Image (cartoon, rainbow, N blue to C red):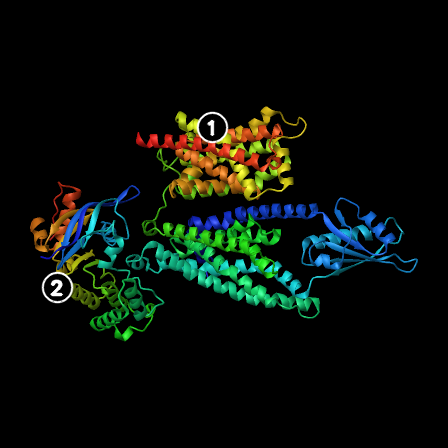
Amino acid sequence: MGDPGIVVDALVKTFGSKAAVAGLSFSVEGGEIYGLLGPNGAGKTTTLRVLAGILTPTSGRAVIAGLDVAAHPLEVRRRLGFLTNTTGLYARLTGRELLRYFARLYGLAPAAADARITALVEALDLAPFFERRCEALSTGERQRLSIARAVLHDPTVLILDEPTAGLDVLASRFLRAFVRAERDRGKAVVFSTHYLAEAELLCDRIGLLHHGRLLAEGTPAALRAAAGGAASLEEAFLRLVATHDDPDAIVAEPS
Amino acid sequence: MKLHTVRLVAGKELRETLRDRRTLAVMVLFPLVVYPLVSLVTAQVLSARVARVEAHVARIAIAGPPPIVARVRRLLSGADFSLAPVGAAADVAANRVDAFVEVTATPAGRPPAVRVFFDETREDSTTARDRVTQALGAVSGAGCAPPFAVATQGIAPRARMSGYLLSKVLPLVVVVMVMLGAFHPAIDITAGERERGTLETTLSAPIDRNALMAGKVLAVAALAALTGFLNLASMSLTVLEGAHLMANSAPLSIPWVHIAAAFAVIPPTAFLFAAVMVAIGSLARSFKEAQTLLTPVYFLCMAPSLTAALGDFRLDGATAFIPGVNVTLLARDLIVGRAPWGLALAVIASTLMYGLAALALAARLYDSERLFFSDEAGVGLGTWLRQLVAGHRGLGHTAEPDDAPTAGQAMGLYAIACVLLFFVFVPLQSWRLEPGLAISEWGGLLGLTWLYARGRGQRLATVLHLVPPTPPALIGAILIGLSAWVVVGLLAEWIVPAPKEVVAGLRRIVAPTGHDRGMLATLLLMAVTPAICEEALFRGPILRGLRTRFSPAMTAILTGLLFGIYHVDAWRLLPTALLGIALSGIALAADSIIPSMVAHFTNNACVILLARLHADDTASLSRGARLGWLAGGALVFTAGAMLLARSSKTRRDM
């Protein structure tokens, strides 16, 4: 395994009196895809926003590529690619204008930026719509352009917040293939989703998140075993949640 | 089309719209608060201007056959005139006199001819013309012939005349247009970005907050400046063409050089308004909310320019530093070609400084924490009303004993107080000052605070944060109360000197001549009452509500400003706002409302005592004496502030 790309240590993030993340710890190494799995409101998005330096932690810390996120937010952002399901692209810019803007923000020299953009246009097949304004693109096209934006500066860490939400089967498959390829190039990837089947397909390790805490962590197979030999990750998750909420409950899947 | 369905849809839409409290606030409170406020202040400024013009002594030069000149001199011997021994029409142009009266003898049986030369572009000169024509043209009795045949003649050159015409209209239009130019772009790049879902994308890029906001403000300022340039050019042509058509005369020449010079005002103005609007837009969570927030701000930003344009103030060491007012006056002076370099630079530099301050504020307000999450807390309107009727043990939600009011509730209370002020308190007080004041303060301000507490299901003492202060805090508050009037009063007088009539009017209220009201009654009504009632509202729920959203310093400044504006007096705005900031600082540092009440009482009591003793005429003090007073006051004030700061630190350490 490579160097630790991401370390989250006793992370707490509260909004008013509500704790969205309540003492979360995990780490992701280079060349690994870590899935943050949990229902809506479990604290996945908040955790990822803290990792991306968009939110500051209430306590605890997050370290990306050896840098404390709260202390060095700008340096951290230069080393990470952040992608969300909302795929916010500037609607009135074309794909090329958008990538050029971000290339300059990331400090790429013009020649290097152009070379990188050309390579990404080819790798992600952006050419058919690259000169169109983002507002005129389909969901799948937008997602591909967003991926290009997120990896433009060749980050060492990728943070993907439910990137497949709203995508069709083909686009989801394309994205998964891309994530695997990035992992194989040695990147540390955190991938949040509430599609359990997808997590099972893609992730090397999974952290089950519930009410801002980690319920369990391990490979998909280890998680199923920990839940008393559950048949699927979904069943494992349901059992673990039920045990956590009410330790005496016995979860039986009706057959 | 079924009427039933129409009604159903209308009902649902109304319900949804009315549940958006911000829309409701702008729809209802805006016309009730902002318009009366702006119109009251404008009226005050205008009446002060009229008083100033009337108080000006018209400088007149007279020439002609000595016997008739002697008659004219007799008629113009009143206090309104100052007669120069000699003169000519050129003296009017050179601003050595306000009007030149040329008398010529006529054949017997006809009144002598009088020609009054004046400068159309100077208000003192047109006033002098009016006074002279009135004095010389007046008929002494029914059936009598007028003593003189009076004619008038303007002497301003055409270029200056057109500059004058343009200077009356253009500055306001340009400032307003620059603001309008900033309005939509500012919303689009703040709240619009949020709505388009690109905020997260932007924030995940390695841009530091200040650079991001500076870039946004620069873009908005560029668009606003472009709007300003286009409007200035187009309006110049339109106004002059219109004047030409109306006057049916030769076209007025456009002073293009002066208009080009006026362009210099646009970039700093655009920068200031862009920064202010981006800062406000950053607070909003949606396009609609940004519009709701920015519309009142737009009108409030327009008010200084409107006042400056209507009030015809002079650009001087004080007005050059008042935002909005300064750029309007400078644009006017540039168009007529009489702007002094030093003041022009002061205006541009101070406007840029205000812009930078607004930009820094924008960067702070563009807070990702708040932008991603709703901060709406507190009691819903319906619950609040139910509790108001049913009292503490009413239905539904009861605020926790230590629940602070929200910032929204603070502003709501302030708006209600303003509405009451305009439509109830002011009429009551002009009906009869003493009972009117007592009812407004005890029934109005304290009553409003009490109703609010009842609605929340809390005790009044809890809402007021009525807790015993530490002895140092109390002593500090007394020291500040003893010195605030001198520090605040002298500072305000130095920055924005109030007209004499305004000061005299105020003195009549505080210390009526004769024995209309005894000392004790005055102290009760004008020191004890505001110290309790005004503090209850302003340093109670308003201060505590704003504190939930802003830093202590910002809370004190905002509460102080609201307090100053509430006193709807253009001349007292600065001193009351400064006093309000000091009182808010006291309440925050002491973490109790009692010291701010004590300081408020002490301050007002000092002012009343001095007015009674006729020892409050600071204008008659020598410069040295004034500096002495200011230094002494500042010393006592600082001692008080230090005591309070220490008490605040001790409390934190406990």
Residue B200 coordinates in the image, percent (x, y): 30, 57
Residue A58 coordinates in the image, percent (x, y): 26, 44
Q: Amino acid at mark 1?
A: Ile
Quadrant occupied by the N terminus of chain A:
bottom left
Q: Is residue A87 left or right of residue B465?
A: left
What secondary structure is found at the residue carrying circle 2?
A: helix
Q: Is residue A82 left or right of residue B451?
A: left
Whether callout 2 and callout 1 share a subunit is answered no
Which is nearer the eye, B58 or B505? B58
Which is nearer the eye, B319 or A169? B319
Give me the chain letter of mark 2. Answer: A
Q: Quadrant of residue A96?
A: bottom left
Residue B160 coordinates in the image, percent (x, y): 65, 63
* Residue drawn at 58 percent across, 33 percent down: B437
Q: Is residue B314 left or right of residue B227?
A: right
Q: Amino acid at mark 2?
A: Asp
Query: How many numbered badges does the structure rendering display?
Result: 2
| Residue topped by disc 2 | A184
Residue A111 coordinates in the image, percent (x, y): 26, 71
* Distance from the alpha carbon under mark 2 to that under mark 1: 72 Å
| Residue topped by disc 1 | B478
